[in-house]
């Protein structure tokens, strides 16, 4: 067996292993996104219930495995902070996911996905379009 054949075989094995590592990270990120979305929805539901049905000064909330009695505004502030943290984590993972998918496609020698890196228009950009295009 020639040395070039062994070198080629090692290179192919490294590429396959790297492809599998990237694919595993993509799947792990998808699972994290599902968990974070569930947490975001639960936080949203908790905020809605507190704001609508609990005009009391102090309420019971669960933090992890602890049950804590806290003033209403403190609980709402805590839930909103958790909501912001969850949103930031979701956006961070989505950004990482885009990079991983691009890397995966490069490793598989496929063309990059078209439109995968699109970003929404800002409020100022939409206002500019509306001012210049009647009926938009």
Image (cartoon, rainbow, N blue to C red):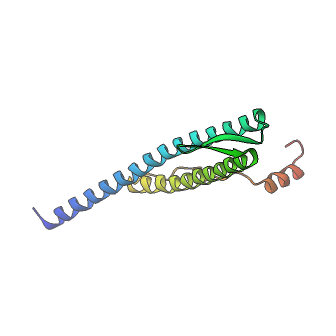
- Tell whether 92 sits left or right of 47: left
For the view shown, which residue lies furthest in the top direction? 53
The tally of labels here is 0
| Residue 49 in the image, given as x and y percentages of width and height | 72, 34
| Residue 122 in the image, given as x and y percentages of width and height | 76, 54
Tell me what residue is drawn at x 26 percent, y 57 percent: 12
| Residue 128 in the image, given as x and y percentages of width and height | 84, 55
- Tell whether 99 sits left or right of 68: left
- Tell whether 54 sits left or right of 111: right
Tell me what residue is drawn at x 44 percent, y 47 percent: 28
Q: Is residue 129 above or below residue 37?
A: below
Tell me what residue is drawn at x 30 percent, y 54 percent: 16
For the view shown, which residue lies furthest in the bottom direction? 3
State the residue in front, 47 or 104: 47
State the residue in front, 98 or 9: 98
Asked where in the image residue 5 lies, by quadrant, the reply is bottom left
- Tell whether 22 sits left or right of 48: left
Q: Is residue 3 above or below residue 93?
A: below
């Amino acid at each position: 067996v020639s040395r070039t054949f062994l070198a080629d075989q090692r290179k192919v094995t490294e590429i396959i292993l790297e492809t599998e590592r990237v694919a595993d990270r993509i799947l792990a990120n998808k699972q994290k996104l599902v968990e974070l979305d569930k947490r975001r929805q639960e936080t949203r539901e908790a905020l809605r219930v507190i704001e609508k049905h609990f005009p009391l000064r102090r309420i019971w909330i669960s933090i992890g495995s602890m049950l804590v009695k806290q003033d209403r505004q403190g609980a709402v502030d805590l839930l909103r902070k958790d909501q912001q943290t969850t949103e930031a984590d979701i956006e961070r993972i989505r950004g990482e996911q885009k990079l991983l998918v691009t890397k995966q496609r490069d490793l598989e020698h496929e063309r990059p996905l078209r439109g995968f890196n699109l970003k929404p228009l800002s409020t100022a950009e939409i206002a500019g379009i509306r001012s210049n295009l009647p009926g938009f």
